[in-house]
Image (cartoon, rainbow, N blue to C red):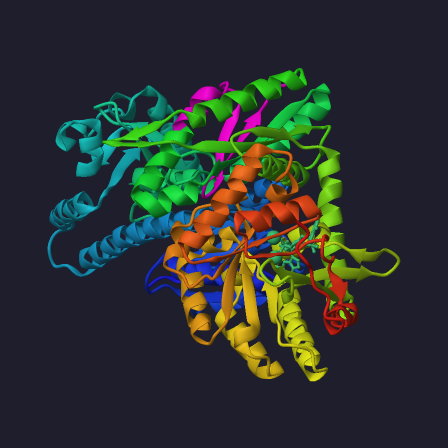
């Protein structure tokens, strides 16, 4: 079990490093100290295997601490890692002079921490094995009856055997630079027989360069009698393969304690280095496409910004979001989705210049950093190319898929000078491309930012409106063609905005839907409409069907069935007099969930109509299985009914279609006697529109009912 000691004056660092140290080895024991003196005196009874210390500490810095540690018997050869900040080169030098083994740069990279600590511990263990064997041999030598000569020979042989089994290069050289010992591993790396290497000059065996370096270091050990702590070196083996080693040198002494040779131990850390490299790569790249990830992109944008500032040049950031990628994933599975992403990555990579960067920054989001933009047209050209390459068909096995992409572009320095700002603005521009119909690109414009801010302001206003009860309902009567009498009423929402009067729903509903506030607003609408219905009954007016509009967002975000049943129970309104208006998009988007709610509510007597029919998909496919009882012809058809023969045909077709499915048909927005007459002749069942009455406040509507106003057929 290894003992790892952490020294840092800051408690957060101590905690982090202790946690990391615990991961170095399965059973590593970790001790953390905040005070250097305390750590030093603790070491006397507890020899550590690895010490990791901060450099900057209030009472004693990392260099001084290392020096004092080296002066203690338990600290002479323990590996010491010193943590310094990036620009602390001076400190590093001081720590090195004091005997530090290795450095880590703060903020500390966790992978690097682990791999350095593991390397040093492995080395430490091998050194200790060798040392232990040497001690045993020495003891045997001292107490043995046999002649020293004989014993020495014997023990050398055994030591050699032990050393041969160690997976590290071990060799010893004398003062003349001759190899006096080489282990099997070292010989294998050199591609020679260990026996023929002994007594040869080191240069002959290790090659000139390494032998020269080794000789200089050996001389240091001979002169000072001090070991040299681990340093990394690259060694090419006899077959030409490169290996990374961490090498240490220690003095070997004779009986009179004079240094007679230098032992060189080199531990092969090639695979650790590769793992380290891999980890470093993974930290900055996306695992699926191997493209740079968001964090690397950020770094690159950062340096581009600096460059642009220096050179007074411009660059562009393109933010790409695939259109309807989720649909592909859902329909064909993640396997195909992944292949598609890789194929897109490949096409993007081939569309840019070498100095540009393509990054994957999220599920189906990519970014391209276009380094050289002399004119805005350069950015346009690239954006166009990106849109084009993504929209070509992708073929996988027998499958052929179409795709498109929306691109948002920001230019630096025009659209922002910070990484975050550029990314955010490119994202905004991308949304603009999406809302303009996808499969296209848009530039960021300061205008967009203004719109985003306005949106936030509207959202806040809507919240206030809810809290301050600024919403009101108007009621528009629905009239039967057969009798000319009012048969129902539609509740229509208005915002009574202080200082502005009644605001129409088109002005605020889109924002209410986007923010989800529509859910709470429509809860209020439903309750208010039911309450009004009850009040009219109490006033002795004839029973009327009250129609309320539902929003697609409600089906996505709330249990519509629960809401309606609860509201009916709460207000006491008779379900048989409630009509809920659905849009085609509700049925398209939430087919399953909506169908269940609709069927259940229908069993309670609630009726359903399809609003704005003719403007959406105009398909009755989804209505077939549902208990819908009315189609409402959109007012845009009614508006041109008399002047445009096409619209006249469409209106007639909708009426016939509705009747053939047993649906009642109501025309919206009837403004003139001609329209009214045409609809009546075409067999429409009911109508709603200014020709009879606009939407009215609750009281005015009650008054209209009380007067028993009706429409008489004109023709
Ligand atoms: P809609 O459900 O199709 O409502 C009919 C719209 O036509 C209403 O507009 C109504 O005032 C207008 N209208 C009625 N007769 C005439 C006419 O003769 N000529 C013209 N030009 N227009 C006429 P409004 O009140 O502005 O509502 C617009 C839309 O907002 C509604 O369309 C509905 O989709 C939505 N909406 C209104 N209230 C609510 C609500 O409480 N909740 C939800 N989710 N949506 C609502
Ligand atoms: Mg409606
Ligand atoms: Mg409508």
Left or right of residue 202: residue 608:
right
Choose between 265 and 252: the one closer to the eye. 265
Left or right of residue 33: residue 257:
left
Q: Where is residue 258 in the image (x, y as percent from the top left)?
A: 35, 44
**Is the N terminus in the top left, top right, bottom left or bottom right quadrant?**
bottom left
Q: Is residue 436 magenta?
A: no
Choose between 566 and 96: the one closer to the eye. 566
Q: What span is in magenta?
A: 346-373
Left or right of residue 697: residue 281:
left
Choose between 15 and 130: the one closer to the eye. 15
Total numbered badges shown on the rendered structure: 0
Residue 58 image-quadrant placement: bottom right
Q: Where is residue 10 in the image (x, y as percent from the top left)?
A: 61, 62
Q: Position of residue 285 (x, y in %)?
A: 44, 38
Q: Where is residue 270 in the image (x, y as percent from the top left)?
A: 31, 37
Residue 37 image-quadrant placement: bottom right
Choose between 17 and 144: the one closer to the eye. 17
132 over 394 or under it: above or below:
below
């Amino acid at each position: 079990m290894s003992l790892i000691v952490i020294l840092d004056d800051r408690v957060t660092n101590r905690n982090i490093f202790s946690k990391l140290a615990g991961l170095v080895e399965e059973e590593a024991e970790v001790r953390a100290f905040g005070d250097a003196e305390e750590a030093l005196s603790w070491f006397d009874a507890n020899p550590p295997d690895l010490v990791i210390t901060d450099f900057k500490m209030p009472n004693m810095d990392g260099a001084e601490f290392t020096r004092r540690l080296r002066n203690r018997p338990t600290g002479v050869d323990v590996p010491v890692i010193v943590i310094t900040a990036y620009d602390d080169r001076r400190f590093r030098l001081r720590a090195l002079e004091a005997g530090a083994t290795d450095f880590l740069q703060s903020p500390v990279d966790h992978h690097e921490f682990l791999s350095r600590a593991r390397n040093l511990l492995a080395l430490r263990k091998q050194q200790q094995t060798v040392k232990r064997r040497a001690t045993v041999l020495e003891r045997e030598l001292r107490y043995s009856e046999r002649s020293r000569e004989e014993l020495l020979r014997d023990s050398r042989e055994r030591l050699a055997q032990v050393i041969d089994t160690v997976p590290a290069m071990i060799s010893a050289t004398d003062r003349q630079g001759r190899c006096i010992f080489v282990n099997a591993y070292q010989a294998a790396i050199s591609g020679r027989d260990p026996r023929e290497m002994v007594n040869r000059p080191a240069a002959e065996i290790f090659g000139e360069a390494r032998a020269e370096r080794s000789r200089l270091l050996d001389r240091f050990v001979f002169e000072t009698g001090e070991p040299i702590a681990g340093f990394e070196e690259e060694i090419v083996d006899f077959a030409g393969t490169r290996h990374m080693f961490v090498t240490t040198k220690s003095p070997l002494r004779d009986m009179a304690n004079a240094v007679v040779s230098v032992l060189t131990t080199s531990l092969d850390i090639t695979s650790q280095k590769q793992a380290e490299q891999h980890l470093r790569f993974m930290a900055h790249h996306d695992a699926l496409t191997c493209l740079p990830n968001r964090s690397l992109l950020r770094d690159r944008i950062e340096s581009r910004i600096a460059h642009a500032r220096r050179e007074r040049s411009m660059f562009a950031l393109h933010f790409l979001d695939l259109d309807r990628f989720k649909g592909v994933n859902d329909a064909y599975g993640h396997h195909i989705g992944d292949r598609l992403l890789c194929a897109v990555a490949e096409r993007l990579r081939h569309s840019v210049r070498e100095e540009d960067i393509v990054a994957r920054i999220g599920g189906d989001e990519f970014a391209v950093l276009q380094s050289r933009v002399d004119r805005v047209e350069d950015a346009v050209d690239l954006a166009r190319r990106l849109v084009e390459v993504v929209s070509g068909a992708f073929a996988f096995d027998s499958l052929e898929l179409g795709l498109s992409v929306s691109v948002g572009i920001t230019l630096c320095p025009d659209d922002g000078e910070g990484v975050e700002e550029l990314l955010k603005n490119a994202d905004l521009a991308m949304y603009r491309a999406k809302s303009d119909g996808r499969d296209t690109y848009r530039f960021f414009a300061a205008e967009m930012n203004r719109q985003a801010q306005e949106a936030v302001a509207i959202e806040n206003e809507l919240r206030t409106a809810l809290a301050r009860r600024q919403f009101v309902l108007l009621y528009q009567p629905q009239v039967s063609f057969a009798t000319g009498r009012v048969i129902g009423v539609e509740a229509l929402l208005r915002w009574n905005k202080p200082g502005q009067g009644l605001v129409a729903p088109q002005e605020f509903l889109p924002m209410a839907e986007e923010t989800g506030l529509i859910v709470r607003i429509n809860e209020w609408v439903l309750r208010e409409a039911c309450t009004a219905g009850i009040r009219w009954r109490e006033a002795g007016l004839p029973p009327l069907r009250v129609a309320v509009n539902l929003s697609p967002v409600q089906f996505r975000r709330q249990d519509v069935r629960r809401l309606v049943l609860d509201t009916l129970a709460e207000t006491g309104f008779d379900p048989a007099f409630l009509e809920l208006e659905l849009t085609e998009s509700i049925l398209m988007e939430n087919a399953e969930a909506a169908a269940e709610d609709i069927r259940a509510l229908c069993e309670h007597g609630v009726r359903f109509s399809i609003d704005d029919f003719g403007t959406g998909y105009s398909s009755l496919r989804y209505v077939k299985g549902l208990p819908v009882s009315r189609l409402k012809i959109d007012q845009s058809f009614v508006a041109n009914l008399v002047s445009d023969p096409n619209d006249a045909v469409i209106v007639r077709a909708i009426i016939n279609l509705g009747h053939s499915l047993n649906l009642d048909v109501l025309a919206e927005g009837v403004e003139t006697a001609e329209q009214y007459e045409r609809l009546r002749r075409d067999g429409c069942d009911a109508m709603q529109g200014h020709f009879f009455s606009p939407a009215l406040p609750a009281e005015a509507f009650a008054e209209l009912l009380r007067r028993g106003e009706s429409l008489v057929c004109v023709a």
